Image (tube, grey):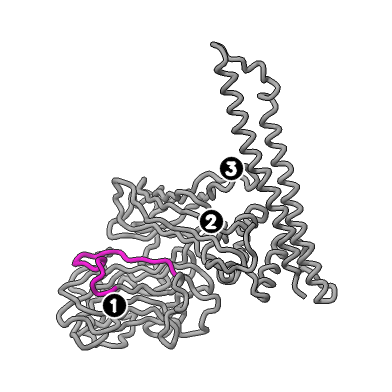
Amino acid sequence: MAVDFNVLFARLTELFEMSATIQTNQTALRTKFDAIVDVYAASSAGGDLDMISGLVSQIENRIDDGRILRQVIKADVQRTVIEMMDDALVAVSGGAGLPEKNPRQAIKELIRQMVDNSKDIDGTTVGIGSTTAVSGNQGNGTFLVSALASQIKAPTVVHNPSVKTELVRARCIGDSNGKYAPSSERFIIEGQRKIDSLDEDWPKGSGIKYSLNVVNPTYDQGTGPGQNVVKDGIFREFTSNDPDNWAIITGSAGATIKKSSTTGFRETSSYALRFDNDGSTALKVRQTLNSNAIDSSLGKLKPDTLYTLSFAVKKAGTVSGGNLKVRVEDSGGTALNNSDANRKMEISLAHNNAAITTSYVLVSAVVQTPRTLPSKDIRIVVETDTAFTNGSDIFVDDVCLAEMHRPTAGGLACQMLAGATDYAVEDGFTIQVTNNGEGKFAKDFDQFFPMEDFGFSLPAIYDGSETQGDY
């Protein structure tokens, strides 16, 4: 049998409300104390603070008494969830109960039962601001972060509610003048100071401090964070205008598909893929992943994992109608996670998109693999979905698909991408992350359980029709 959700959430609501009341009173006490100090300090030339020496010496201790009580509430919240989930399992499985009576197992079981019984809470939305380059940057790549949640650990949830509002900074701490190769510079990613979940000013900051290397598309066929899964995404090798590690699906080498006549976006030793459009053929090349066959890459994807998809593009001539698409697809030609607009593994640029100019620009997006991957025939594709204008050219280079770094399971994922010019020490970027805090139950579970460490989120819905309303 399932846990009695009405009883469980009623109990938790009362505990959450009591904790919130204590937190409010802590703030009120501090405000009132400041007002008292003001009137005593202003009462004479030297002030009369000695008259309230008792209050001055004791106020912080007494405010902290509220924290002590909230610690007790936290323990009772965890005990309530653990015992009720264990009791529910004992009732249905003849005494088996939770595998271990701890918060991780209890929350995991609560999520499972909520999914099975179509229960959900109010969702929380996390906004990711625009990437801002620090003035004076030498390198011209980009910095990406994402708050997208696990589709397994956080079913129906878009963003991890445990992600905090903060300004995230990326700063180059090692370049090619040191021990790092060009386009593989070392960056440190830092968030704002983290405070304890029972602090009266919580929530603030993630405390993230994480080092990573720039994704270099040259280092290909990878399987780990920051490694390009694609083989020869820089199009270094051609044979008679046929890209050696890519299969031409539509179009013909030397006629509509060619090696560019100049060097590529970033590597002087490489070229670029040129679509010489003829006005009648939709052009397409592809590469199979996790395969040692011809026109394939040994690079392998992981399920339920965030990746950055990126490439450089420019044009020559005027294009009217159609889209340039780079995507990861299954054997039927459908983009992975096609039904999820937040995670779809595709970048589509309209023919008149301002990003496509006569100079190379780096185009990038965060995508996510589905919770279950096809067993074979996963491909990365570069194509025009209709025939582009006769005489127009599209150049594509540095196709890169790389797993993002995720310091904590329920926190931000991050990635640094290389541009045409390499980074130098002290180059940097900032991104503002904003958690709207709308889901109070989600916020409270994050406060009383280590949800960021677990990567868990209770099933949520965002249209106001949640089964468990906020208090």
Q: Is residue 321 visible?
A: yes
Q: Distance of mark 2 from mark 1, alpha carbons?
A: 34 Å
Q: Tell me the residue at 23%/69% (across/down).
A: 314
Query: Residue 421: where, in percent of width, then height?
Result: 28, 56
Q: Which amino acid does the dot numbered 1 rest on? A: Asn
Q: Tell me the residue at 52%/79% (across/down).
A: 373
Q: Which residue is mark 3?
A: 201
Query: Residue 32: where, in percent of width, then height?
Result: 61, 31
Q: Tell me the residue at 34%/60% (across/down).
A: 418
Q: Is residue 465 left or right of residue 241?
A: right
Tags 2 and 1 touching, CB below 8 Å: no
Mark 3 secondary-structure assignment: loop
- Of tags 3 and 2, which is closer to the observer? 3
- Of tags 3 and 1, which is closer to the observer? 3
Tags 3 and 2 touching, CB below 8 Å: no
Q: Is residue 452 visible?
A: no
Q: Distance of mark 3 from mark 1, alpha carbons?
A: 48 Å
Query: Residue 85: where, in percent of width, then height?
Result: 76, 66
Q: Which image quadrant for residue 243?
A: bottom left
Query: Residue 271: where, in percent of width, then height?
Result: 24, 71
Magenta span of residues? 350-367
Q: Residues within 10 Å of mark 2 (few under 14, many from 20)?
A: many
Q: Which amino acid does the dot numbered 3 rest on? A: Asp
Residue 323: which disc?
1
Mark 2 secondary-structure assignment: loop
Q: Quadrant of the C terminus?
A: bottom right
Q: Which residue is mark 2?
A: 163
Q: Which amino acid does the dot numbered 2 rest on? A: Val
Foreground residue among 32 and 308: 32
Q: Which image quadrant for residue 395?
A: bottom left
